Amino acid sequence: MDKSYLKEFDLAAVQNYELARKQWDAELPEKIEYADKPLKWWFNHWTEKYPTKPYAIIGDLALPYAYCNDVSRRLANALLGLGVKKGDRVSVMSPNVPQYLLAMHAIWKIGAIEIPANPLYTVPELTGQMNDSGAETVIVMAAFAPKAIAMMQNPDCAVKRVIAFQLPSGAVELPQMEGLYDMNTLVGTHPNTEPDVEVGMDDPVRFQYTGGTTGVPKGCVLTNKMVYTMGLRTALWTTKNYTMVAEEDVRTLAAVPFNHVYGFNANVGLNLCAGGSIVCVPQPKPDALLAEIVKNKPNIWASVPAMLIGLLSTPQVKAGEADITSLKGVFCGSAPCPVAVMEQFEALTGAKIVEGYGMSETSNILTINPVHVRKAGSVGVCIPDTDLVVVDAATGTKVMPLGETGELICRGPQVIKEYWQKPEDTAATIRDGWLYTADIVVMDEDGFIFIKDRKKDMIIVNGFNVFPRELDEAMFANPKVKEACAIGVPHPTKGEAPVLYIVLKDGETMDAAEAEKYLRTTLAPYKIPVAYEFIAELPRTAAGKADRKALQALYKEKNG
């Protein structure tokens, strides 16, 4: 096949990169130097440099680097003692608490691979993810341990052992059983020597799953190099090369879950490159966010619009009684943020908000608005060492002129080379070194990207991917249901939200409450539709498939 168009891609990439580079903050280096050191090296490095500096903070608890590294080493040796070895997959299932971070570093110290799992997932969802990754070990917060135990007891699930950790705020009673271990006990009975396991930059550290597991999940293989180069560029951009926030003062507010690529990179990855501190927020409700900001003074925050709006709506902030001016640099992603909200927040705090765009397949970030300039509605320009080209959506081989819509393709050190054990999906998404994002965009004359649509039907709810087919199949399993079809609709705080159209079998009755109760037994809370529409029959495409676009038009006509 003639692939002469690849030369056109290269030429367009150079031109687009130069457009974007002119927009970068002046403080950013022209060329970023990357060290050839894996993630576990960096954690040891910062421990030696800042042994007493807090690494993980939550409420009144501040855990120094030396303590965190000590616990991680002990847990790493415990994992080795249980038979976990380099290349094995170990899942961490927990909200944003310090133990998540300690477990993650322990996994990396032995060259194992972290499988981040959303603790709000149902057992069937989690089972699909464990089986796809082959994770035999789960490290879990005790409150969610029953889910992990259920998987361990399922002979059709890969999980063989569960390590549960308790929170100081209150222990959860768990059964005494084979395969279930207490993390504190393991830590207390193993040495704090650094495991002698060689880890290279191309070794995987995490499989970042792209969506729900009712269908076929896809694990993005993230390597040491990908996470490190992504974290370093994130740190440099957000701090304006440490001129807005000094390197030794970096303190991030971890409100987006660590199991999400956004929360992972903007907190774990960034601080591995900056030697900063992470303020953990397990439940990012407005009052909890405010409490951590006031008490622990974070200065970098990876947020979503709903968090900004919620914080501004708290009585203390509205009354001017809470000091949140420690915040200096704020990411905002997952959905467009109203300009009025950004302006209000910046006026109140003095912070700078930058909107960005990325994917699990890109270790998080492809584009961000520079700190000094922002275009309304844009997700910014490409970050350093990232090539972007807009191509025709039909064939993906023709470069589109500036100002015209097309599919965004990309390449860079943060871009995955493969989905875990899915060669066909890999080949469909990554072609000749370019990752096809399936996002329809426009690039303007200054290199700024404006997202217009998605080729795929994915719905992004507060930054989390929800696939309509997953909702369709979950509802279709109900014996009363003949057909079901989910669509995404705009939502004032979530960015997008699912709406489910349902066709019942003849003679059956069902209301929204019954439909929701049924779905909550199999789906995570954020996947639950915000509305249910009962319809006599679904509109069809020419190929006979349910027509989601027609349903979106129907919903818009009815609801405005």
Image (cartoon, rainbow, N blue to C red):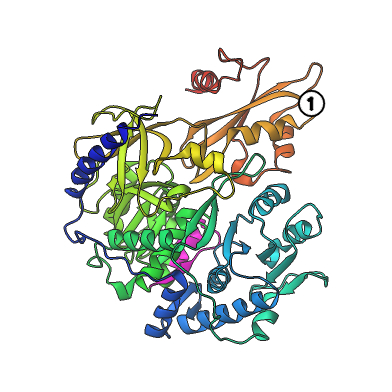
Q: Is residue 239 left or right of residue 471?
A: left
Q: Is residue 266 visible?
A: no
Residue 357 position in % (x across, y down): 37, 45
Q: Residue lying at the far front in this picture: please name it.
A: 1
- Residue located 78% across and 57% down the image: 150
Q: Nearer the viewer, residue 428 or 304?
A: 428
Is residue 291 located in the magenta-colored stretch of the structure?
yes
Residue 153 position in % (x across, y down): 81, 59
> From which residue to which does the magenta span run?
276-292
Q: Is residue 530 left or right of residue 366?
A: right
Up-down relation of residue 106 to residue 360 (above or below): below
Look at the numbered disc 1 and give the secondary structure of its residue: loop
Q: Residues within 10 Å of mark 1 (few under 14, many from 20)?
A: some
Q: Nearer the viewer, residue 108 or 2?
A: 2
Q: Is residue 203 visible?
A: yes
- The quarter of the picture where residue 300 lies is bottom left
Q: How many marks?
A: 1
- Residue located 20% across and 55% down the image: 25
Up-down relation of residue 195 to residue 153 (above or below): below
- The quarter of the picture where residue 236 lies is bottom left
Residue that label 1 marks: 480
Q: Nearer the viewer, residue 493 or 25?
A: 25
- Residue located 67% across and 43% down the image: 523
Q: Is residue 306 left or right of residue 476?
A: left
Residue 118 position in % (x across, y down): 61, 54
Q: On the rendered image, what quadrant is the N terminus found in?
A: top left
- Residue located 51% across and 83% down the image: 67
Q: Nearer the viewer, residue 345 or 269?
A: 269
Is residue 21 located in the magenta-colored stretch of the structure?
no
- The quarter of the picture where residue 352 lies is bottom left
Look at label 1 and name its amino acid: Lys
Residue 396 position in % (x across, y down): 38, 30
